[in-house]
Image (cartoon, grey):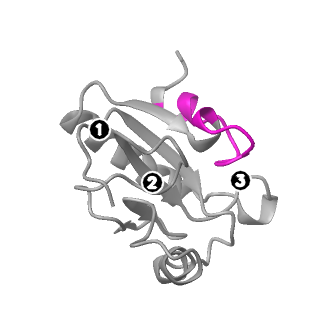
């Protein structure tokens, strides 16, 4: 794991799984199945809107191949490309809360969806910037 230098980007992912997916499930996928040192995201928002810890914030995430340096990675459990697994209101509220807190700590941080920085993915299944920046975006 590489130490994080400065956080410049807030990158949002979805788990591409049911909203019943747990942090333990994601950690198992990343550590046991992919062989990573730890879960790839800094924070995970559960299906009921709890913000859970993932990878220690002192390390770059392992979430955007080739684009991890200087990013804070958050995964919202669910899959916005499938109606039955779309994010719930509590999850969106938690994401907005986390984004607001990160902007206080890192005022120049910019929001991105995984798909905005890595081609070939639909993740997180929607354009995240209008949600986080508001209707004037």
Using the image, determine if residue 28 lies above or below residue 125: below
The local secondary structure at tag 2 comes to strand
Mark identifier at residue 80: 3
> Residue 7 bears which disc, if any?
1
Residue 129 included in the magenta stretch of the image = yes
In this picture, which residue range is highlighted in magenta?
116-132
- Measured as percent of width and height from the top left, residue 54 is found at 36, 68
Report which quarter residue 2 is drawn in.
bottom left
Label 3, label 1: how many angstroms apart (C-alpha)?
A: 26 Å
Estimate the x, y position of residue 17 in percent, counting from the top left.
Answer: 68, 69
Pointer 1 local density, CA inside 10 Å: few below 14, some 14–19, many at least 20: some
The residue drawn where x is 52% and y is 15% is 136
Task: Tell me if 112 is positioned left or right of 110 in this view.
Answer: right
| Nearer the camera: disc 3 or disc 1 | 1
Helix, strand or loop at label 3? It is: loop
Q: Quadrant of the N terminus?
A: bottom left
Precedes in sequence: disc 2 or disc 1 = 1
Q: CA distance from mark 2 to mark 1?
A: 13 Å
What residue do we see at 72% from left, 65% from top?
85
Question: Which sits in the foreground, 7 or 80?
Answer: 7
Q: Quadrant location of the C terminus?
A: top right
Residue under circle 2?
A: 74
Residue 38 place in picture, x, y as percent? 39, 72
Magenta highlight on residue 91: no
């Amino acid at each position: 794991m590489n130490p994080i230098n400065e956080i410049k980007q807030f990158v949002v992912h979805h788990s591409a799984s049911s909203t019943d997916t747990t942090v333990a499930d994601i950690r198992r996928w990343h550590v046991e199945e992919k062989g990573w040192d730890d879960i790839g995201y800094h924070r995970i928002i559960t299906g009921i809107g709890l913000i859970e810890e993932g990878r220690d914030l002192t390390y770059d995430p392992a979430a955007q191949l080739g684009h991890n340096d200087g990013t804070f990675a958050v995964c919202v459990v669910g899959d916005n490309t499938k109606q039955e697994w779309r994010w719930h209101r509590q999850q969106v509220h938690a994401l907005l809360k986390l984004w607001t807190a990160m902007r206080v700590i890192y005022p120049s941080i910019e929001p991105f969806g995984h798909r905005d920085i890595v081609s070939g993915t639909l993740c997180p299944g929607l354009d995240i910037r209008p949600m986080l920046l508001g209707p004037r975006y």
